[in-house]
Amino acid sequence: MSYCIPAERLSLAQQERLRGMADTMCRSRLAKKLVIDLSAALNDQNPAVICRDADYVVDFVPAANQAGLAGWLTQPMLAAGGFYSVFANNLGAPLTPIVLNNQEWVFYGIDILDADAAKETVTQIRFGIGAAANRRAQFDLEGLYSGQASSGYFSQPVWYDPQEIATVQVRARIPTGAGARVRLMALIAEPVQQTVI
């Protein structure tokens, strides 16, 4: 069952456990795809696979569309009830990023960063695969607005394997005409790179 848990209802230990589950999932799925020994991939002292926070601009936006972008921004929300891509370029067009051959992506939570988040601008988030956006997971976000911060953790991490197309969208409650600042808590696993001198 997939649901979103408001961050302020979780202890720091519970938040760390959910992030740790995402880290383990991310590294182990990539190890399986790249045929890396699982114990080596999960070795914290000398890992064969590292897991890092995602960089929205570099990891999800093609280089040709990165100018003027500094962080998470959805497509402009033009109609109430419409679904809009979490990944948008500086023209507002949707992007469907593709996971690189040597990466695994795992999303484990969400922050709604808009200054006017109290207006409850987005109500749902859905994670799809491919151009057809076949649904992998969906979370209701309205429960996040009852707290002091609009931040939450997913009960189950959402993964994307190498070469999968990530189609992630939010549903607009209010047609603001602008993009929403919806930040996904995301990890990216990669094999450790060796530098040859």
Image (cartoon, rainbow, N blue to C red):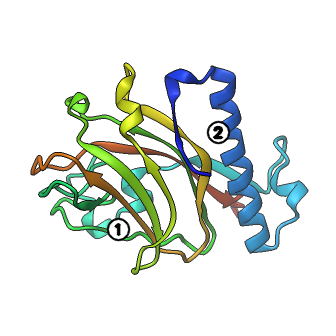
Instruction: Give the left or right position of residue 90, taking residue 53 as reference.
Output: left
- Taking 3 as reference, is 15 above or below it? above
Q: Which residue is mark 1?
A: 62
Front residue of this view, candidates 45 and 94: 94
Find numbered disc 2 in the image and state the secondary structure of the residue it sits on.
helix
Query: Is residue 86 at least partly visible in the picture?
Result: no
- The number of numbered discs placed on residues in the rendered structure image is 2
Percent from the top left, x then y, of residue 11? Answer: 63, 20
Instruction: Give the left or right position of residue 6, taking residue 125 as reference.
Output: right
> In terms of image quadrants, where is residue 60?
bottom left
Percent from the top left, x then y, of residue 16? Answer: 67, 30
Instruction: Give the left or right position of residue 188, taking residue 125 as reference.
Output: right
- Taking 152 as reference, is 146 above or below it? above
> In terms of image quadrants, where is residue 17?
top right
Instruction: Tell me what residue is drawn at x 69 percent, y 23 percent.
Output: 13
Which of the two labelled residues, at mark 1 and mark 2, occupies the earlier sequence position?
2
- Taking 79 as reference, is 102 above or below it? below
Query: Is residue 169 at least partly visible in the picture?
Result: yes
Q: Which residue is mark 2?
A: 19
Q: Which residue extends farthest bottom? A: 132
Q: Nearer the viewer, mark 1 or mark 2?
A: 2
Front residue of this view, candidates 107 and 78: 78
Task: Verify CB contact (< 8 Å) between mark 1 and mark 2.
Answer: no
Percent from the top left, x then y, of residue 177? Answer: 9, 51
**Quarter of the picture holding the C terminus:** bottom right
Front residue of this view, candidates 73 and 36: 73
Find numbered disc 1 in the image and state the secondary structure of the residue it sits on.
loop
Separation (CA) of disc 1 from disc 2:
27 Å
